[in-house]
Amino acid sequence: MKMNFKKTVAAVTASACLMLLMVAADMPTATTGYKAGDKARDFNLKNIDGTMMSLATNKLATKGAIVIFTCNHCPFSIAYEDRINALNKKYQLQGYPVVAINPNDPAIEADDSYANMQQRAKDKAFTFPYLLDNTQEIARTYGAARTPHVYVLKKEGSDFVVKYVGAIDDNKDAPEAVTKKYVESAVNELIAGKEVSQNFTKAIGCGIKWKKAN
């Protein structure tokens, strides 16, 4: 009986370890995603107006772009919507427009469907493109893990190079209590021709809703 019990425990433990390894392998991490200095992959994703958009075809992205992985349902994303709108209004005419991307699987979170993206953008009067990463390939390539998760890119020739990765600022709950505006600081330094002094912070938000493996 004791031997059978030990074998059962060992089998369960091995199975659990295998499942954890499979999950870990399926999830992007900071080491597999982009860091400052990496050349960012372009994309061609569907916008809420039905058109396809890439970094290369974004006429406002003359100096770079503020790519933000976000979504409809996450409380963190919702808390930052007005600030994301403000970022776009402040920087799009300076060559750094916001490009928002929803990476979530609507089969897991129905609120993040394409139709709900269109409605959310209308309700909140988004001034920026809101793209659907239907295959989640772009989120995985960039290494996005949370919503919101920001990548500030600088245009160098025909390439877009990562200059900052992480959070928008240091206070989700109270915009008036923010003491560190990470994205604004990064873009301001780039516009001034400087290197970004803080090129990474930890993104705080909801985990991306990844498609289940077939």
Image: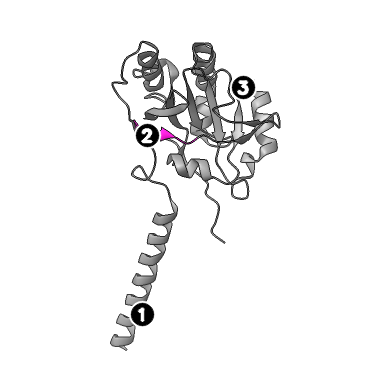
Q: Label 2 belongs to which residue?
A: 38
Q: Which comes sooner in the sequence, label 1 or label 2?
A: 1
The residue indicated by pointer 3 is 126
- Distance between mark 1 and mark 2 Cα atoms: 47 Å
x and y percent of residue 205 in the render?
44, 36
Give the number of the mark in front: 2 or 3: 2
| Figure disc tally | 3
Determine whether label 3 and label 1 are within 8 Å by CB: no
From mark 3 to mark 1, how far is it between C-alphas? Answer: 55 Å
Q: Amino acid at mark 2?
A: Asp
Against 60, is 137 above or below? below
Q: Who's the residue at 55% across and 34% down the image?
A: 101
Q: CA distance from mark 2 to mark 3?
A: 29 Å
x and y, in percent, of residue 138 in the image: 51, 41
Element class at badge 2: loop
Q: Position of residue 40 (x, y in %)?
A: 44, 34
- Camera-side mark, 1 or 2: 2
- Quadrant location, the C terminus: bottom right
